[in-house]
């Protein structure tokens, strides 16, 4: 996307922990989602080549929320992340009921670990970004009965991000 003068304020804006979806902020500043994510303090961004390792780790977390956000829909699935295997150019999710599908994992250019407030609640998500800087999908740390982030999952999220932090791409 074309840079605009107001983009100089994007990092300052993101430090203020603004409300709204990251996609709304990208639209407001006329930048890609990836550019908005890079402006978030303390974000960890790793190469998309770590897709398999990240997916496999998250499978052990228990129930998570899987989200796809397009201009027309925000679709969520809460449950266990299924295993997958490669075939016919896709990472094919191996699940008989509930969540299934086919992901073009080769299109994953970057993976971002993002913690931020949204609707006055703490969130922690892993955002899989394609080569255009758009989200392929997001995986959110689950919530407990009190609507708080599951502590064990949050610890695993932070540990996974830290494990890859040395390969951070900015």
Image: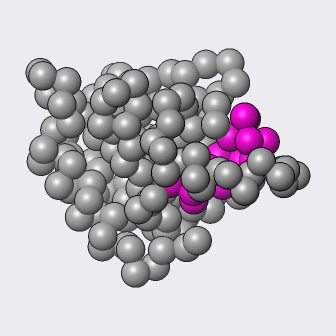
Find residue 43 and report its image quarter. Answer: bottom left
What residue appears at the point 53 percent right and 40 percent down from the top-left corner? Answer: 137
Asked whether residue 70 is drawn in magenta, I would say no
SS assignment for the magenta stretch, majority: helix
Determine the residue located farthest toward the right in the rendered image: 2
How many discs mark residues in the rendered view? 0
Q: Nearer the viewer, residue 4 or 38?
A: 4
Say if 126 sits above or below 19 in the image. Answer: below
Residue 96 in sight in this render? no
The scheme the figure's colours follow is one colour
What residue appears at the point 21 percent right and 36 percent down from the top-left corner? Answer: 149
Quarter of the picture holding the C terminus: bottom right
Q: On the rendered structure, is 62 left or right of 100?
A: left
**Which residues lie in the magenta part?**
26-40
Find residue 66 and report its image quarter. Answer: top left
User: At which x and y percent is residue 65?
Assistant: 34, 32
Say if 26 sits above or below 132 in the image. Answer: above
What residue appears at the point 65 percent right and 50 percent down from the top-left corner? Answer: 10
Q: Nearer the viewer, residue 155 or 20?
A: 20
Residue 118 in sight in this render? yes
Q: On the rendered structure, is 81 left or right of 110?
A: left
What residue appears at the point 64 percent right and 31 percent down from the top-left corner? Answer: 24
Determine the residue located farthest toward the bottom in the rendered image: 166
User: At which x and y percent is residue 146?
Assistant: 12, 22
Q: On the rendered structure, is 78 left or right of 19?
A: left
Q: On the rendered structure, is 17 left or right of 110?
A: left
Asked whether residue 28 is drawn in magenta, I would say yes
User: At which x and y percent is residue 125?
Assistant: 39, 45
């Amino acid at each position: 996307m074309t840079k605009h003068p107001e983009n100089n304020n994007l990092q300052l804006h993101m430090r203020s922990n603004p409300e709204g979806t990251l996609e709304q902020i990208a639209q407001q500043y006329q930048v890609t989602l990836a550019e908005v994510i890079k402006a978030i303090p303390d974000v960890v961004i790793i190469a998309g080549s770590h897709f398999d390792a990240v997916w496999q780790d998250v499978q052990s977390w228990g129930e998570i929320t899987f989200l796809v956000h397009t201009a027309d829909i925000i679709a969520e699935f809460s449950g266990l992340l299924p295993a997958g295997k490669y075939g016919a150019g896709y990472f094919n999710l191996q699940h008989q009921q509930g969540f299934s599908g086919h992901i073009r994992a080769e299109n994953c250019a970057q993976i971002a670990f993002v913690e931020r407030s949204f609707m006055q609640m703490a969130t922690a998500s892993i955002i899989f970004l394609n080569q255009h800087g758009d989200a392929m999908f997001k995986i959110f740390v689950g919530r407990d009965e009190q609507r708080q982030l599951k502590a064990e999952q949050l610890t695993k999220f932070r540990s996974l991000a830290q494990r890859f932090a040395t390969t951070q791409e900015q």
